[in-house]
Image (cartoon, rainbow, N blue to C red):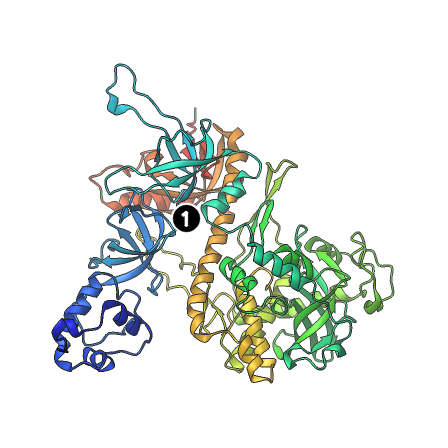
Amino acid sequence: MQKRSGAAALPDPAALRTFLEADRTPVSPPDILRAFGLPTHLKAALRTHLHAMAVAGDLALLHPGRLKGITGLPETARAIITRMGRDGLPLAHLPDDPRGSTVGLVTPHLDGNLLIPGDELILRLRPATGRTRREGRPIRLLSTASRQIAAVFQPANPAREESPPSQARPDQLIPCDRRLTRPLNVMPDDASPRPAPGDVVLADLLPTQDGQPPQARIRTVLGPATAPGMPAALSLLTHTVPTEFPAAVEEEACRVAQMPVPQDASEAASAPSSERRTDLRSLPLVTIDDTTAEDFDDAIWAERTADGFRLIIAIADVAHYVAPGSPLDAEARKRGNSVYLPGRVVPMLPPALSAGVCSLKPGDDRLCLFTELAITPTGQIRSGKLGRGIMRSAARLTYQDVQQALENATTPDQTASPQPDFNSSPALAPNAPFSTLPTDLMRTLQAAALALQADAIARGVLSQPEEEYRITLDEDGQPVDFSLRERLPAHDLVASFMIAANRFAAEELIRHNAPGLFRVHPAPPAPSGDRTGGPRQPARMQARYAASPGRHYGLAVEHYAHFTSPIRRYADLVTHRALLATLERDARIAASLQPDRADLPALAEHLQLTERRAASAVQTCQDRLAAIFLTPFIGHTLQAHVMAATRSGLAVTLTKTGTPSFLSFLALPDDSGMHDDSLPMRSDLSSGTRFLNSGLLPVVLTATHPAQGTLTLAPAPRRHAS
């Protein structure tokens, strides 16, 4: 048989891409040819072959620096569409770019698909100019977001008799996802339900060609945007948060929830070393959470010692119930975290676990993973140990309960002896949370927390509390009040204990060289002058998950991990498994618990996305509730904090509800030349600085849009002295 020569002898693109993506070691054309057993005289043909692959987007997923000795290849990158620009063109994030660059797409279509937020694709990047946002042309879709769109129905607007037919507008859908800026034309279909004007519907996005208006077919009518529960439902729909558990996952959760809890720690004596447990039921461990919480991840206890404090932080042992690779595990990983919306919770784990056997409910025996820390009077962690335990929460306390106890001279509801027998205590009455607790427990917890807080201040931690609003819903689920959530010393008490446990967990991972997920928070860039000519505040960097340890700037610690919330965060479950592997003497069992080091970078990126998705879903739900709440105030003057000035207007936050909104410069009074096109841009931006410096700005609410969770604002008319 005659041997192939030239380009015909080269491996096909799929085989070459598999080879290049399998490793990170830099390779040159001769290295590639040798790996495939081909002669080096094919270098020129291979370069041509690689160039064609780059044009097709086949090299976009290679590790940076994988190819060496090859120049002139088109620059391609993996991208995730985040939103649509005002011009209707998509904007995308480059997840593999450490700078977190945003790229503008030159077309909203690819292969007959309208690109929407959540789509992952390969872009061919245009050369950077340094003056404007980079642009890219979509080459290939890697994955697509759901094509089922929640939208508001707007009936057709027929042209008047005296108007040309071209002015007629068909039935349209206005997307509820405010990242989608283009209306969708309704595809006529006799089988589709007919909604009332203003109803929210679910519609299927249809394939469209470039230059054609996007179309959708109505599938279901959901009802008015102001219906009870609609704000939460829309926020979950527009963020594609999974709300239903597959049957196999529910069945597994119910099965593992029936596993008996050992009644005596000695029962586990023959178990693997990582399963052996310390009996903590004699300690008055307490949970401290919000009033509405049902998933109690953590419980705390402390006592004074001769040289400081002894702390025990007990965390729900979710790893005992959720086996790696199981359907339960796969679903928890996909969700990434629980989502807490006003009036609704979407748990990461089925309720049989999240609100059942994993939740550290008072009076019930529960399995836990605990850290025992010895700290100095000034809050430094002197030593610590990790173990598995059996515990029984002595009380379910709220932050308000604890705050009242700290403020009172004596502990409320004090009726029992200072040292009750917690090993035989029955379930506690909910109206007497302190009745069986030692008299000095709250004061000891407070003293230990103050020591930890003193150490944090000494490290240079800067407290930057953010305003958070509590939304009160009536029995029908409608918003009736927005009020600033009070940050109590009791919140800081619990946070101090959790931070200490998380720090210790990270140090244990590093001490054992164990694979795990770390929480990394980069330092902000140095302040510099901004475009308005004034000083610019340091940018607030976002903490993120990483497979390698790094400094946490916000907490001023060298290493940090999430360990204390495995019921609601998958990253914490990964940390638990990694730490349990360090306790296991059997190498085979340890290997089954240990996370796959090669999988951690992709897992860190996925959990970063689910974390942002949850935060965005919560914010948009609050915004939708605010739009409903503020509808009676249309036409009224409200106060807004000016948060930032952009090229096109002011980002503001209403003081009444904490709702973010936007006020275009075009709506502001023209008294400073800010709309004069003959003046340089600095004039426009310096006007923004003037509003920033003014702090509060009176605005008129002109419209609310509950389906999108947006408001329309106008500047309040000026009052002139008479």
Q: Is residue 330 above or below residue 216?
A: below
Residue 498 rendering spot, x and y as whole percentages:
61, 66
What's the residue at 83%, 64% (across, down)? 425
What's the residue at 51%, 79% (across, down)? 514
Residue 339 rendering spot, x and y as whole percentages:
55, 53
Secondary structure state at the residue bearing disc 1: loop
| Tag 1: amino acid | Ser
Q: In this view, does 314 lie to the left or right of 75?
A: right
Q: Is residue 667 above or below residue 357?
A: above
Q: Is the C terminus in the top left, top right, bottom left or bottom right quadrant?
A: top left
Q: Which of 406 and 208 is in front in this view?
A: 208
What's the residue at 59%, 84% (across, down)? 586
Residue 442 rendering spot, x and y as whole percentages:
74, 63
Task: Give the residue furthest to the top.
Answer: 161
Task: Give the residue furthest to the front.
Answer: 1
Q: In this view, does 10 lie above or below 633?
A: below
**The quarter of the displayed image where residue 280 is located:** bottom right
Q: Is residue 546 visible?
A: yes
**The quarter of the displayed image where residue 350 is located:** bottom right
Q: Is the N terminus in the top left, top right, bottom left or bottom right quadrant?
A: bottom left
Residue 79 rendering spot, x and y as whole percentages:
32, 58
Q: Nearer the viewer, residue 249 or 77?
A: 249
Q: Which of 509 and 419 is in front in this view?
A: 509
Q: Is residue 491 visible?
A: no
Q: Is residue 62 left or right of residue 178?
A: left
Q: Nearer the viewer, residue 264 or 446?
A: 264
Q: Mark 1 points at which residue?
A: 146
So how many labels did they put on this image? 1
Judge the density around disc 1: few (<14), some (14-19), many (≥20) Cα neighbours within 10 Å: some
